[in-house]
Amino acid sequence: MKTNLRILAAAALVLVLVKNSSASEQPTPLTMYLWPDRASRPGERELPDKRNNVCRITDVCAPSIMVYRASGTDPAAPAVMVCPGGGYSILAINLEGTEIAEWLNSIGFTAVVLKYSVPKNRDGALQDAQRAMGVIRLHSKEWNIDPDRLGVIGFSAGGHLSARLSTTYETRTYPPVDEADGLSCRPDFTMLLYPAYLGDETYTLPKEVAVTSNTPPAFIVQAQDDVAYVNSSIAYCLALKQKKIPAELHLFPSGRHGYGLRPSAYPVAGWPKLCEQWLRNTVPNKKP
């Protein structure tokens, strides 16, 4: 009996050590709810896996952010808020959220994954995004973030949300909650990956996305065989061009939709290297 107890104790110790080792390699992100009055609401629901290893969550009634801090950077690291896609019905939280955060960390950026309101709440999602940018800037010193080098990256519906955030930052779309809402919610730079809902066959932007001369510079990626949404990227890029806003559009012949960072035989899979170079040119390093 004593021998069995010793074995069980040793096994438990090994599990703890393995767990701690994994945690040191991938630190648990800091999680913060965006709206104090909603923090006690029931959590989101995870949908069954469709055998493609995509974690889909829905019923997000208590929007939050998950902060993945970069390591080995200067005293104030640049940061990117990550907006996963999912048709405003679900959030592909690993494919277009946490996996993107890990990549951003690997190139020296702190990442903040946004869990915005779903399903069917586009205006609520915009409020979440605006609020999140103010919260990040409010805590920038605490989280070792440079508030003047804070951008946004969005995928599919998250790309639409990121474009809305990048063009509707002058006025909050909700009553102020605290001092975070007195800070700017304008991204300093924008990255759109296969964005949805931004353009029709005439390459006209929807009314809720109004590009101005102060819209942030953008990096955009799309595939031509992403038939439903290819016009979105072209429309946004043309609108930026008309306002003389720097933009870089990569339009690949094939690649379809929803690839994130996953391996692919399509050339579009090379977008991270292109994006990293754009970031190096657009978000210069600052010396301590």
Image: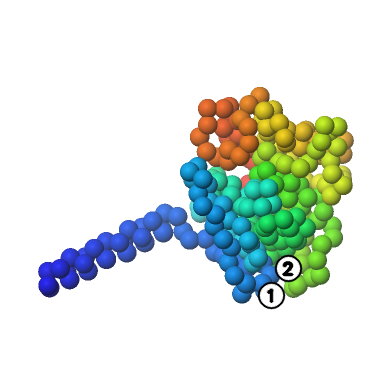
At 63% across and 36% down in the image, what residue appears? 257
In front of the other: 202 or 169? 202
Quarter of the rendering occupied by the C terminus: bottom right
Q: Toward which corner of the image does residue 140 lie, by quadrant?
A: bottom right
Disc 1 marks a residue whose amino acid type is Asp
Quarter of the rendering occupied by the N terminus: bottom left
Judged left or right of residue 108, residue 153 is: right
Q: Toward which corner of the image does residue 156 lie, by quadrant?
A: top right
Image x and y of residue 207, in percent: 87, 47
Does 204 appear above or below 171? above
User: Which mark is on residue 180?
Assistant: 2
User: Which mark is on residue 37?
Assistant: 1
Whether residue 163 is visible here, answered yes or no, is yes
Q: Secondary structure at mark 1?
A: helix
User: Which mark is on residue 110?
Assistant: none
Number of residues whose C-alpha sits closer than 10 Å to that of mark 1, classed few (under 14), some (14–19) or many (20 or more): few
Disc 2 marks a residue whose amino acid type is Ala
Judged left or right of residue 88, residue 271 is: left
